[in-house]
Image (cartoon, grey):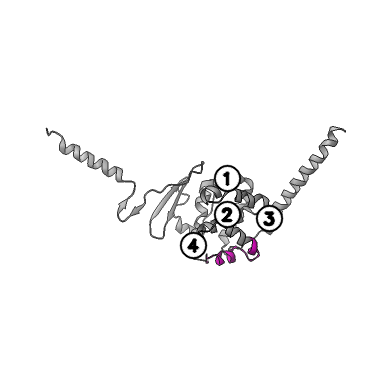
Amino acid sequence: MSTSRLLQPIVLVAALAAGIGSTHAQTLSLNWNPRSGDVWVDTQLADMNRYGSSYRDPFINEMVRYHDVPRDLVTDLLIRRRWAPGDVYYACTIAQTIGRPCSYVANEWERNHGQGWGVVAQRLGIKPGSAEFHRLKNGFVPTYTRWSRPIVLDADLKRAYPNHGKAKGVVTHKHSQGKVVKGHADKGHKGHTDKGHTEKGHKVGNASKGAKSEQGKGKAQGKGKH
């Protein structure tokens, strides 16, 4: 048997696999509609599909590290169950917001996905316009910052992140209590740290400066005494 004949089945299998993947991607782009109840969220989840399909490993790492989802579950949803990355992200972020495992929300979505994410989220306790919904929506911004991926904020998010995009790699989030928290993200996905956080008149992070100042005063007072 010639080499060309031996290779024919392999080529056929590869072609079929590529065709299936292409068909799935095409169907996803044409028919996928999250119906979250928020136009901005729908747009962003569609962009999640593009990112998660092109950069699967960073997407999975984000879900595992920052959304407390078991890696096996993320890969199962994406690969075996052929979920859209946007659905994976939203299910697991809703789960994190309501304090339930991602598998719980995933099962709820598989039973009722025909109703759309807006209805499912409301059934799980996240009502439109609620503090939980805004927390869910705000979570997109630090995720995109960790990915170094551009994100256009709507009016609500511009109020929550008034300085977003003004400094490279910095996300500034204004909490409802009026506190401002700045987060820095790097390419290694190390997350972000708080600085400039003020509580009850005490500025965190300046204690060391105060200690140095007191030390300097002590040295000046003790100088020349024996």
Closer to viewer: mark 2 or mark 3: 2
In which quadrant is the C terminus drawn? top left
The boundaries of the magenta stretch are 110-127
Q: Residue at x 72, y 49 (%)?
A: 21
218 inside magenta stretch: no
- Distance from disc 3 to disc 1, alpha carbons, whole Å, reads 20 Å
- Return the mark for residue 89: 2
Closer to viewer: mark 3 or mark 1: 1
- Return the mark for residue 132: 4
- Return the mark for residue 96: none
Q: Nearer the viewer, residue 124 or 118?
A: 124
Amino acid, disc 4:
Glu
**Where does label 3 land, which residue?**
28
Labelled pair 3, 1 in contact (Cβ < 8 Å): no
Labelled pair 2, 3 in contact (Cβ < 8 Å): no
Query: For this view, does 224 lie left or right of residue 213?
Result: left
**Where does label 1 land, which residue?**
58
Task: Write down the quadrant of residue 179 in the picture.
Answer: bottom left
